Amino acid sequence: MDKQKIKILIVDDEKDIRDSLKDILVDEGYETLLAKNVSEAKEIKLSQKIDLILLDIWMPDIDGLSLLKEWSANNEINCPVIMMSGHGTIDTAIEATKIGATDFLEKPISLQKLLKTISSSLKKLVVLDEIDKTFIAECNLKYIKDIENEINQLKKMYLVGFVGEKTNFMGIFISILFNTNYYLVKKASDINNNLLNLIQTSGLKFLLIDNCLGSLEKNNEYEELFNEINSKKIKILFLEKERASFGKFFKNENNISFYEAPDFLNDRDIIPDLANALLAYHLSKNSNLPFKVLDSAALNALRNHPDIQRIDQLDKVITSSIKSSAGELINRHDVESFFDQHNVSVEKNYKTDINIDVLYKKPLKEARDSFETMYLKYHLEKNKSITNLSNKSGIERTHLYRKLKQLGIKV
């Protein structure tokens, strides 16, 4: 993201301070606006969209706290406001934050403190939504284009079965396939002729049946109803967690087209490229984000971590790393901090084992790290005790703690 899109208003009655702060921020790539008093600050704020304000407390006409109170009373604090003072006290800082200030800087302000506070304040504006179908449409990776093409092919089918958990990707799949032109059924008892009439009168073209096959009786009544729905040019999407659910209901699975949520179990080498694509997507969608890049250690950590198996999981790690990273580089620590906060596993309902063929394709050290991670997590979850794990693995407790930390396993 280009910092020049971020406008920072500097409000201070001392010209030297205004000019000094401006020089620093311009060098960092920010666009700066200057006001020597409250009147000029109000005028600039009304005429332009400001992304952050550096506001001095002590000024000759009206002090900064009074201006902050006025903005707060009028509900006009619509960007981070960082207060500045050469004679500030803890009480003053507390009062400013209670009124609505984001942070407080004491003069003289060091370069490092200034930039860190601005970066931290801008991050508080950042709301990183999960990816949506625009990511699928805009991403040029072959892996993603193959997914998009496969989903588009399913638009031609009458019966489609989606196999997988209820994740954000399932929502993307539905959005590409049906947009919002569908009727959702969550109870088997709702699937009847009355439903068919409702769909017809509503002008909808798609029926989405959510995990109902287990409670549907396998008889001709429903098969005839599905055939009647088909005759009305209404397409059906079944959502089920397991492929076996379809086999129990349909006599011939050749009559239905299946789509299984993509994973990285057999191709973990796609993870670094996909991680970079997800990072680029989020940076492009949020104008308050400074430029970020994943370093090689972070990319290797993502590729080797056994808990990252699906796009949704990888996206959560990327958005977390964007927020936690202090500088331009997202490093291994930023990536691993996500797993520390989420107790090792990204989503407990996903398997944590890796196809053994994947290990054979790795360099020996990476394969060993992946296997040790799976082995230790498995026994840690079973035993819930470092002592038991030490006895089971034959690793002395001190060395075991070091090994768990090295592999990013939170105890």
Image: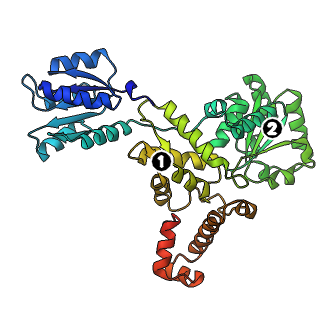
Q: What residue lies at 35% left-to-right and 29% top-to-bottom?
A: 29
Q: Nearer the viewer, mark 1 or mark 2?
A: 1
Q: Is residue 134 visible?
A: yes
Q: Nearer the viewer, residue 93 or 195?
A: 93
Which badge, 1 or 2, comes first in the chain's sequence? 2
Q: What residue lies at 25% left-to-right and 28% top-to-bottom?
A: 23
Dot 2 falls on a residue whose secondary structure is loop
Residue where numbered disc 1 is placed: 320
Dot 1 falls on a residue whose secondary structure is helix
Q: Label 1 crowding class (10 Å Cα cut-off): few <14, some 14-19, many 20+?
A: some
Kindly indicate whether the residue at mark 2 contacts the one at mark 1 (C-beta within 8 angstroms). no
Residue 180 figure quarter: top right
**Residue projecting furthest to the left:** 60
Q: Is residue 130 visible?
A: no
Q: Nearer the viewer, residue 262 or 66?
A: 262
Q: Is residue 353 left or right of residue 247?
A: left
Residue 66: percent from left, percent from top:
14, 29
Q: What residue lies at 72% left-to-right and 52% top-to-bottom?
A: 241
Residue 373: percent from left, percent from top:
59, 67
Note whether 333 is above or below 138 in the view shown: below
What label does residue 233 carry, if any? none
Q: Is residue 332 left or right of residue 57?
A: right
- Quarter of the rendering occupied by the N terminus: top left
Q: Nearer the viewer, residue 375 or 295?
A: 295
Mark 2 belongs to which amino acid? Asn
Q: What residue lies at 9% left-to-right and 31% top-to-bottom?
A: 58
Residue where numbered disc 2 is placed: 192
Residue 394: percent from left, percent from top:
57, 84
Q: CA distance from mark 1 to mark 2?
A: 45 Å
Q: Label 2 crowding class (10 Å Cα cut-off): few <14, some 14-19, many 20+?
A: few
Residue 224: percent from left, percent from top:
91, 38
